[in-house]
Amino acid sequence: MYDRLPHKFAFCCFALTCVTFLFGTVGCQQPTGPHVADLDPYVGGRPAPMRPVDRPAPPPPKHYAGGADNGWTPPGGFSKRWQCIVVHHSASDKSTPEGMRDYHVRQRGWDDLGYHFVIGNGVKYPDGQIFVGNRWRQQKHGAHCKTPNNHYNEHGIGICLIGDFDAHPPTQKQLASLARLSSFLTAKCGIPDSKILTHGGVTHKTACPGRYFSLGPVLRIMSARAQAADPDLEANFVTP
Ligand SMILES: [Zn+2]
């Protein structure tokens, strides 16, 4: 019986070798299919590739049909406060923007000229020349048309024509400049022509801007200007 033991041992060794070989070969065999890393994780199709978000295009700038803007546009842009234009006269033919400013500051105690614009008459300030006040440049409320709720100072653009229009009418150049400026302001600030007003028309407590002044010719010039743009619109512009 003992003589068969080596044979049994040899058989066992052979069998073990075969099993080891079999498992070794099969266990290390690479899968025939694709690697996991190669599999597409998206079921039902890949999403579209990422693209930059489309930003809305900025609105086109509003262009004033009348020509170049030589400084009537405030440095910081237009305030949304403006709802109307109030026209005045200075009640003196010899006024100047500087003189009126000095009077407003020294005599009335205001911080600056009360109006936003002044239009010369050719006596001491060039005929039709438009003076732009600091209040307009700063888009600050006016000090020109007092009412109980102060609406016209808060929301009205004050324009003063130099001259005494209780004694005579304004010059043609003044009317033309007022029409040019009003066309610009109504377009830029969204003010309807019906909101171009006079001081006396608002308060009924003053004759300003005088019995020889009428808005009719100004509105007619504005209407004509709307039909045909004037490239020399802001020729009379001047800064303080
Ligand atoms: Zn007035």
Image (spheres, grey):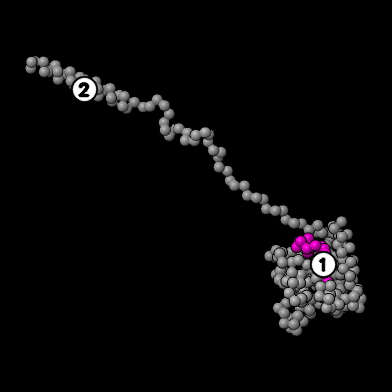
Q: Is residue 193 magenta?
A: yes
- Which secondary structure, mark 2? helix
Crowdedness near tag 1: few (<14), some (14–19) or many (≥20) residues, C-alpha within 10 Å: some
Left or right, 71 with reference to 126: left
Q: Position of residue 164 (x, y in %)?
A: 88, 78
What separation in Å lies between label 1 and label 2 (alpha carbons)? 111 Å
Where residue 57 appears, as percent x and y from the top left, is 67, 50
Camera-nearest residue between 150 and 47? 150
Question: Which contiguous range is marked in magenta?
Answer: 181-199
Name which residue type carries label 2.
Leu
Count the marks: how many? 2
Where residue 196 is drawn, which disc sits there?
Answer: 1
Q: Position of residue 237 (x, y in %)?
A: 80, 67
Percent coordinates x, y for residue 191 in the rendering: 78, 63
Q: Quadrant of residue 195?
A: bottom right
**Residue that appears at 89% across and 66% down:** 216
x 14%, y 18%: residue = 8
Of pointers 1 and 2, the one earlier in the residue sequence? 2
Report the quarter where the N terminus lies.
top left
Q: Quadrant of residue 163?
A: bottom right
Of circles 1 and 2, the one toward us is 1
Q: Is residue 78 above or below residue 3?
A: below
Based on the displayed image, in which of its 4 quarters is residue 177 positioned?
A: bottom right
Circle 2 residue: 16
The C terminus lies in quadrant: bottom right
Say whether mark 1 is within 8 Å of ligand 1. Answer: no
Q: Nearer the viewer, residue 203 or 95?
A: 203
